[in-house]
Every structure is written in C-alpha cells, then in structure tokens.
Amino acid sequence: MPSDPSSAADPATNHSGVTAESLAQKLKETLGASLVEIKDMSGGCGQMFEATIVSEQFTKKTTLARHRLVNSALKEEIAAIHAWTPKCFTPEQWEKRNQSS
C-alpha cells in the first residue's frame, strides 16, 4: 500500500495537469480564436483531447499548417498528454459548416 494516498491510481484524477479549460484559454490568447471547444475524451484523466478551433489565423493555410500553428502554441501541453486531435476552421468555414447542418 502506498504511503501517500494521492499517489494511488485513480482514473478520475488528471495526471497530466492539462485541462480542457487551460487548453482553450491558451488557444484563445495565442491564436485569437473566436471559438474553442475542447472535449476530454479520456474520461477525466486529462490524457486525450479533441478540439474544434475557429481562428482568422487559419485563413489561406493548409490543414497541415493549421495543425502546426496550433501544436506550436500548445507545445508544452501536448508533450504532457497522450493524444491530441485538433479540427481547425476559419470563421467562414465554420459558418458554412453550421448552415448546412
């Protein structure tokens, strides 16, 4: 039995120190994102996130360039988690996507 109860394995504990809120805040600040939706896909342990990001900075950039921009902004956070899936849109793309659904 571990002497420190906080070191016991608890699947609901966020071991990475990364939260959906901290990711969203950093993306809004660094990319000037108008919309950031982050889902913790790991069941609360903070190891797997999926993101929808809308920013003017994605205009005229390829998908790869957009992902690199996001990954650069979150370099430290991404290193601390297991999986990261960004979905990047310009405001115009996001508007068209929401009109068709």
Image: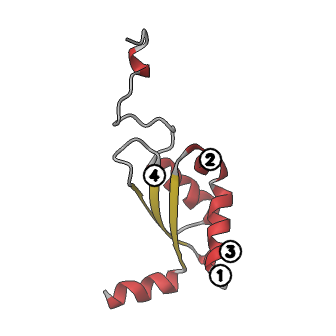
Whole-angstrom CA distance, mark 2 to mark 1, is 23 Å
Q: Amino acid at mark 3?
A: Ala
SS under mark 3: helix
Q: Nearer the viewer, mark 3 or mark 4?
A: 4
Which of pointers 4 and 1 lies earlier in the amino acid sequence? 4
Q: Quadrant of the N terminus?
A: top left
Q: Residue 69 lies in what quarter of the image?
A: bottom right
Which of pointers 3 and 4 lies earlier in the amino acid sequence? 4
SS under mark 2: helix
Which of pointers 3 and 2 lies earlier in the amino acid sequence? 3
Whole-angstrom CA distance, mark 2 to mark 4, is 12 Å
Which residue occupies 51% across, 43% down? Answer: 18
Which of pointers 2 and 1 lies earlier in the amino acid sequence? 1
Name of the residue lying farthest toward the top: 3
Which residue occupies 41% across, 12% down? Answer: 2
Give how far across and how far down residue 59 sits, in percent: 63, 82
Residue under label 1: 62
Q: Are marks 3 and 4 in contact (CB under 8 Å)?
A: no
Which of pointers 2 and 4 lies earlier in the amino acid sequence? 4
Q: Quadrant of the C terminus?
A: bottom left
Q: Amino acid at mark 4?
A: Met
Residue under label 3: 65
Whole-angstrom CA distance, mark 3 to mark 1, is 5 Å
Give how far across and how far down residue 34 sits, in percent: 51, 70
Mark 2: give few (<14), some (14-19) or many (20+) Cα within 10 Å.
few
Q: Amino acid at mark 2?
A: Ala
Q: Are marks 4 and 1 in contact (CB under 8 Å)?
A: no
Residue under label 4: 48
* Way the structure is coloured: secondary structure
